Amino acid sequence: MNVLVDTNVLIDYVCNRSEFCDAAESLFALGMTGQVNLFITDISIVNALYVGRKYGFSSEQLSSLLHQILSFAHISIINDEVIHNALTSDWKDKEDAVQYYSAIASLVDVIITRNVKDFSQSIITILTPGEFLTNQKAD
C-alpha cells in the first residue's frame, strides 16, 4: 500500500510533538519495516527542516533523522503538472492541493494527515494516523 504522509505528521515525528508522536512513530515504523510504502513530498522535508529548527533541533540532528527516514520512504512527485493542477484547482488551501496532486501523481492509495477536513475534495482515502493504524490492525 502506498501512503503519503502529510507535512503535519512528518513534523510530529521529526519534532517529537508529544501529543501526536506515538501515532507518527507507529506509522513510520510500518514504513521502516516495509509493511507500507511511505511517500513524502520534497516540500514537506523542507518544512520539517524549518520547523525542526524552531523546536530547537540542530541542522545536523534534523539532517540525520531525515536521511534515516529517506532510507525507507520515497519522495512524492512535485512537478510542473502537480503545481499547475494545484494552482488551478478550487481547493481553498493550495498547499494541501499540492500534497493531493502529488499523491495522485505518485499513485498513492491513502493520505495520512491530522487535517482530514482540509482534504474534503479528495478522491483518495484520507485518514488520521490513528485511523490508519486502527485499519492496519484490523487487516
Image: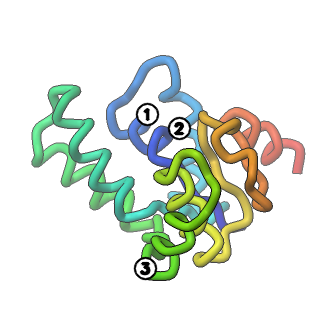
| Distance Cα–Cα, label 1 vs label 3 | 26 Å
Name the disc covering residue 12, or none: 1
Q: Is residue 71 left or right of residue 90?
A: left
Q: Amino acid at mark 2?
A: Ala
Q: Secondary structure at mark 1?
A: helix
Q: Which residue is mark 2?
A: 24
Residue occupying the point 88% across, 51% down: 139
Q: Secondary structure at mark 3?
A: loop
**x%, y% of residue 59?**
11, 46
Counting residues from the start of the chain, the first of labels 1 and 3 encountered is 1
1 and 3 marks in contact (CB < 8 Å): no
Name the disc covering residue 79, or none: 3
Q: Which residue is nearer to you in this view: 32 or 133?
A: 133
Q: Amino acid at mark 1?
A: Asp
Residue occupying the point 11% across, 48% down: 60
**Is 95 located above or below residue 128 in the figure?**
below
Mark 1 Cα-neighbour bin, 10 Å: few <14, some 14–19, many ≥20: many
Q: Secondary structure at mark 2?
A: helix
**Is 18 located above or below residue 124 in the figure?**
above
Q: Which residue is nearer to you in this view: 76 or 59?
A: 76
Mark 3 Cα-neighbour bin, 10 Å: few <14, some 14–19, many ≥20: few
Counting residues from the start of the chain, the first of labels 1 and 2 encountered is 1
Counting residues from the start of the chain, the first of labels 2 and 3 encountered is 2
